[in-house]
Amino acid sequence: MQIDLSLFPAFDSPYTNPKSQTLAASVMALHLQLIHASGNSLHSERTKGHYFFRNESVPLPRPATMEAWSLICRIGCSESPYFIPPFLPSLRADDEVGDAIQTRGAKVPSLSRKSSLHLRDDQKRIIWGSVYLARVDDYFGNGNTLLYEYDRSNITESKLSMPRGFFWPASQESPIRHRMEFLASFGLPASNGLFAEIQIPAIHRLLFQFFRQDAVEAWSGKYAETHHLVKLDSGLAKADHKELMREIIESKQGNKGQESDESDLGKALEKYSKKPGRFADLGDISF
């Protein structure tokens, strides 16, 4: 079993890049960061592989996960500095009824309207949160990466307010919500199969939401900062992989009483990494 990059960030997405030599390691790091992050609003459903992070609880990009975050959030060609912070796609009229349910079964591409986790206004209407367009190279200008705010997430990339030179023919007609819907419906199937072999929790449902502007500004600023750091130092991502593993193992050692039902991450990854052809670019990591 390997990480299936054809399923990341979404099946049939123009941003899928199965030829990358380093993406598998970044997807693995993102998966591990997410399942060990605090602030999962669906903690009671964690055993089902459901994760929902909101505002300051959304895990911040770091060098080890930057390539994976880029494919989730980037808008346009590989040189494009534009990205969209992750958001919670609002449900459309047919998402929970009729043909949609027959086609997708229980896979709802967002948080159910009946969920008690929704924030609502004084008229009991769901607050889904805005969609923001941001730019990484504004980070060293005025320190604010956010450019535009959109109320709707069903528009295509070609409708966004960005220069024509950065649009990508392969993705111009893609709805900006496609990748977020896939994550909300299926989580990270690219890495779930591999991690099942070593008894590391799967992610079957992954949702994010920003409805406070200070929170989305902080997250997008970290994205831009990390983007620049990785670009300046190509070895930073690999070094951060080691740091991430160390942080997770130390955290598990300090919470063994609370997590006795989980396999030991260090032993599992150490055993698996010794198999031929597994995590070739992480082969020198010491667990």
Image (cartoon, helix red, strand yellow):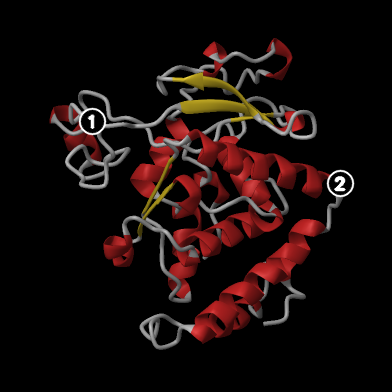
Residue displayed at 49% across by 63% down: 37
Q: In which quarter of the image is residue 94?
A: top left
Q: Is residue 237 left or right of residue 220?
A: right
Which labelled disc corresponds to residue 232?
A: 2
Q: Report if residue 71 is visible in the image.
A: no
Mark closest to the chain's N terminus, 1 or 2: 1
Residue displayed at 22% across by 28% down: 125
Which labelled disc corresponds to residue 95?
A: 1
Q: Quadrant of residue 106?
A: top left
* Of residues 63 and 134, the one drawn nearer to the viewer in this rendering: 134
**Number of dots carrying numbers:** 2
- Crowding near the residue tagged with mark 2, few <14, some 14–19, many ≥20 C-alpha atoms within 10 Å: few
x and y percentages locating residue 271 in the rendered image: 59, 83
The C terminus is located in which quarter?
bottom right
x and y percentages locating residue 280 in the rendered image: 72, 67
Q: Report if residue 104 is visible in the image.
A: yes
Residue displayed at 77% across by 75% down: 284
Q: Quadrant of residue 249?
A: bottom right
Residue displayed at 53% across by 27% down: 132
x and y percentages locating residue 222 in the rendered image: 66, 45
x and y percentages locating residue 233 in the rendered image: 86, 52
Q: Nearer the viewer, mark 1 or mark 2?
A: 2
Dot 2 amino acid type:
Leu
Q: In this view, does 205 lie above or below 80?
A: below
Which labelled disc corresponds to residue 120?
A: none
Determine the residue located farthest toward the front in the rendered image. Answer: 122
Callout 1 secondary element: loop
* Of residues 170 and 287, the one drawn nearer to the viewer in this rendering: 287
Dot 1 amino acid type:
Asp
- Crowding near the residue tagged with mark 1, few <14, some 14–19, many ≥20 C-alpha atoms within 10 Å: some
Callout 2 secondary element: helix
Q: In this view, does 10 lie to the left or right of 185?
A: right
